[in-house]
Amino acid sequence: MFALRTPPQIEFLCDPADLGVIAAPIPAREVLPDWFRRLPAVDKQHLSTSDNALTVKRCMPFLDAMTTGWVIPLAATVRLEIADGGQTVHSGWDFDRTMISNHHAYQVAGHPAQPRPPCKFHNHWTIRTPKGWSCLFLQPLNRPNGVFEIAAGVVDTDSYTSLIHFPFFATGPDGLHTLEKGMPLAQVIPFQRSSVQLPGVVRAETPAEAESRVRIQRATAASDGWYRKEARDKR
C-alpha cells in the first residue's frame, strides 16, 4: 500500500500563554474589507451601451490579490500618535507584549518615506513552511488603511524559524490613531522558491501569439466572466 502524502502547509506557532489571547492568523479570503463586501458587482447608475459599469468586484486579478495567502492581524490594540507631518511617532498599548519599536533613521537613509521615521510592528507568531518554501510579507494587498504602510520582505521560513517583525512607516495625518486588535497587519504569501527562479526572455511576439492575445481581449470584452471561467477556475 502507498502512504498518502500530506499536502504542504504553513504553520503559525505562538507562546502557549498567547494562544487564544492574541489575534490569530486568518486565511486572506476570510477577511475581505467591508467596503468590498458592500460594493455591487455592477453600478447600475452608470450602466450604458458604452460602459458595462462593472466594478472591481468583478475584477478577478484584484480579488485574487486580496484573497491569496494569509493575513496576520494586529495582536492587540495599539495607539499611534503621529505629529510634525509624520516626522514624530509615539506609540502605546496596554498589552504585556511589545507591540511597536523603532528602527534607526540611518538604516533607510535616502528612502522616499523620509523624514518619516522607520518603525516596527512586533509579530508574536513564528511562521514555518516546508523545505523549499519561503514567504512574502507585505502590506495587505488592495487594503490601504490610511495610517501606516508595511515594508515588504521575503523570508526563507523553512530555515528561519523564529519571530519575523514588520517594519513600517506611519503615513497617516497628525493626530492619535487607535489601531484595534485584529485589524489586518500583514499579508503572508507562501511560495516555492524553485517556482519563481524562471529565466527571462525579451522578444517580439509571433503572429500566433498576437492572435491569441487579441482573442482573449475580445472574449473578455464580450463576457465579463471569461477570465474567471476560462483561466482562474481551471487552475
Image (cartoon, rainbow, N blue to C red):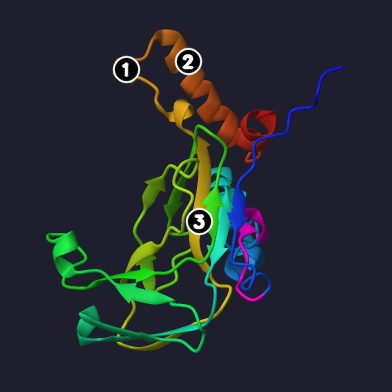
Which image quarter holds the N terminus? top right
- Relative to the observer, which residue lies in front, 184 or 173? 184
- In the image, what residue type sits under mark 1? Val
Q: How crowded is mark 1: few (under 14 residues within 10 Å), some or many (20 or more)?
A: few
Q: Name the residue under label 3.
A: 187
Look at the image and say whether residue 182 sits in the magenta stretch: no
* C-alpha separation, residue under disc 2 versus residue under disc 1: 20 Å
Q: Which of labels 1 and 3 is toward the front?
A: 3
Quadrant housing residue 218: top right
Q: How crowded is mark 2: few (under 14 residues within 10 Å), some or many (20 or more)?
A: few
Q: Residue at x 65, y 64 (%)?
A: 37
**SS label for mark 1:** loop
Q: Residue at x 44, y 66 (%)?
A: 144
Q: Counting residues from the N terminus, which is met first, the one under dot 1 or under dot 3?
A: 3
Q: How crowded is mark 3: few (under 14 residues within 10 Å), some or many (20 or more)?
A: many
Q: Residue at x 46, y 41 (%)?
A: 159
Looking at the image, residue 14 sits to the left or right of residue 213; the answer is: right
* C-alpha separation, residue under disc 2 versus residue under disc 3: 37 Å
**SS label for mark 3:** strand
- Please state the horizontal and vertical placement of residue 82, each as a whole percent of the image: 30, 85
**Residue stretch rendered in magenta on the structure:** 21-30
**SS label for mark 2:** helix
- Please state the horizontal and vertical placement of residue 141, each as a whole percent of the image: 47, 55
Looking at the image, residue 154 sits to the left or right of residue 75; the answer is: left
Q: Counting residues from the N terminus, which is met first, the one under dot 2 or under dot 3?
A: 3
Q: Name the residue under label 1.
A: 201
Which image quarter holds the C terminus? top right
